């Protein structure tokens, strides 16, 4: 056997033994019945109520968004047919970039294949531009930012304690005063559901002459008066150098983007490999995203329903003495604390109660903090929440799961 094949056997056996072998449940999303999905398990097909989708506002199944995609597919076809440089830039792409720049109050925006690629390609491009960058990265940053930072062969990396301003300041002060500096962080952290102190980070950036790179993936469409994210809500968008987002979560479609000053984006557009050497987003996706952003810019009531739902579910978990992790975002994590159990609870929820919540295991979160993650949206009703609490109480023995 080739050494690599033996390695695959060994690694997979170890992952299984640790109870974190990843089984993808084939969930058929039903556009007209979201958040119900159709699932076939052990030969039987039934409806499952999904609690873990990142299509937080159900925009991916909004009839207006679907109509925009269908119309664009008929008119322009299924694919872009080239990179942005090779016949792949349509007026639709330009319009979407203008809409995103406007959403964040920036000069310009650039589209990428995904939020992952936008982080990876942009951070590598920035941190490879000068030989002596110092980058300050929150300890809980998403893998796409970490990989983007590691893509620079020369940057000095400082990982600061999650949302810890004293630790960030200490590290900023320790770097050479004249070196170019960048602070990379998120607004809403999706696994704990907590939110960064954006204006304090901007203050530190001013004090130490650092640029700022903010991942708003779990906030765009949902926070701020027009869905411009926590930076809009906190009134600090103008102080952030680059705001990055996705079209795939709150906006319910697909693709990633960055926004910022014209000169900075013109540079990224000209040097970032992950932007240059790949086919432009397909027109149906671009049209759908454009429709979704325009709807959400207007619809503050939908955002209000999202937050009311999250607060209601947290309150119900608390009242039932279920170990909800406290945070002020729309994400509701329930601490389980071990991989086998998180997987088992998730499987029992599906089999016995027809509901699905993703188990979040290592390496997504540290070992010992395995959890289930709930993202109630505007289509999850109070009756659904009550049924969920009853199911969880049945599966988890409350005496054993009550917080110490
Ligand atoms: C999901 C996610 C991304 C990647 O976005 P995609 O559009 O799904 O590729 C980036 N950053 C964070 C924090 C994420 O959770």
Image (cartoon, rainbow, N blue to C red):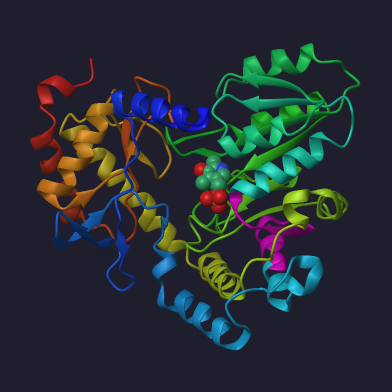
As displayed, is residue 109 above or below residue 1?
below
Residue 335 appears in the figure: yes
Does the magenta segment cover residue 110? yes
Residue 75 placement (x, y as % from top left): 60, 88
Q: Is residue 328 or residue 215 the one in the foreground?
A: 215
Asked if residue 2 lies left or right of residue 379, the reply is right
Instruction: Say which quarter of the image contains residue 320.
Output: top left
Asked if residue 243 lies left or right of residue 219, the reply is right
Instruction: Say which quarter of the image contains residue 177.
Output: top right
Residue at left 26%, top 44%?
Answer: 313
The span shown in magenta is 97-115
Residue at left 11%, top 35%?
Answer: 395
Q: Is residue 116 or residue 404 the one in the foreground?
A: 116
Residue at left 40%, top 56%?
Answer: 304
Figure quadrant of the C terminus: top left
Residue 218 appears in the figure: no
Residue 372 placement (x, y as % from top left): 30, 36
Asked if residue 64 lies left or right of residue 258, the reply is left
Q: Is residue 168 or residue 42 the one in the foreground?
A: 42
């Amino acid at each position: 056997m080739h050494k690599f094949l033996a390695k695959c056997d060994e690694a997979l056996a170890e992952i299984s033994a640790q109870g974190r072998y990843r089984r993808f449940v084939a969930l058929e999303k039903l556009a007209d019945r979201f958040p119900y999905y159709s699932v076939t398990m052990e030969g039987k097909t039934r409806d499952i109520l999904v609690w873990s989708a990142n299509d937080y506002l159900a925009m991916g199944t909004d009839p207006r968004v679907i109509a925009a995609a269908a119309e664009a597919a008929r008119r322009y076809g299924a694919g872009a047919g080239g990179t942005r440089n090779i016949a792949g830039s349509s007026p639709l792409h330009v319009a979407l970039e203008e809409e995103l720049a406007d959403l964040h109050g920036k000069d310009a925006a650039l589209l990428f294949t995904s939020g992952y690629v936008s982080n990876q390609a942009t951070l590598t491009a920035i941190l490879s531009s000068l030989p002596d960058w110092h980058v300050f990265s929150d300890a809980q940053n998403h893998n796409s930012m970490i990989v983007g930072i590691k893509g620079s062969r020369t940057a000095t990396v400082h990982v600061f304690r999650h949302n810890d301003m004293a630790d960030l300041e200490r590290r900023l002060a320790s770097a050479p005063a004249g070196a170019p500096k960048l602070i990379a962080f998120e607004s809403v952290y999706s696994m704990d559901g907590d939110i960064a102190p954006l204006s304090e980070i901007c203050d530190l950036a001013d004090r130490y002459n650092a640029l700022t790179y903010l991942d708003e993936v779990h906030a765009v469409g949902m926070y701020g008066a027009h869905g411009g994210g926590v930076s809009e809500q906190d009134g600090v968008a103008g102080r952030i150098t680059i705001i990055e987002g996705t079209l795939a979560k709150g906006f319910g479609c697909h693709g990633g983007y960055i926004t910022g000053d014209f000169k900075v984006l013109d540079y990224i557009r000209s040097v970032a490999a992950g932007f240059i050497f790949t086919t432009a987003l397909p027109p149906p996706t671009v049209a759908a995203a454009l429709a979704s952003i325009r709807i959400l810019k207007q619809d503050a009531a939908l955002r209000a329903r999202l937050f009311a739902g999250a607060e209601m579910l947290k309150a119900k978990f608390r009242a039932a003495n279920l170990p909800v992790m406290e945070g002020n975002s729309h994400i509701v994590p329930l601490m389980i604390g071990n991989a086998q159990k998180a997987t088992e609870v998730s499987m029992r929820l599906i089999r016995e109660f027809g509901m699905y919540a993703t188990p979040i295991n290592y390496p997504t979160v540290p070992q010992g903090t395995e959890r289930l993650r709930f993202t109630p949206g505007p289509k999850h009703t109070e009756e659904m929440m009550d049924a969920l609490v009853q199911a969880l109480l049945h599966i988890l023995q409350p005496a054993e799961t009550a917080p110490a």
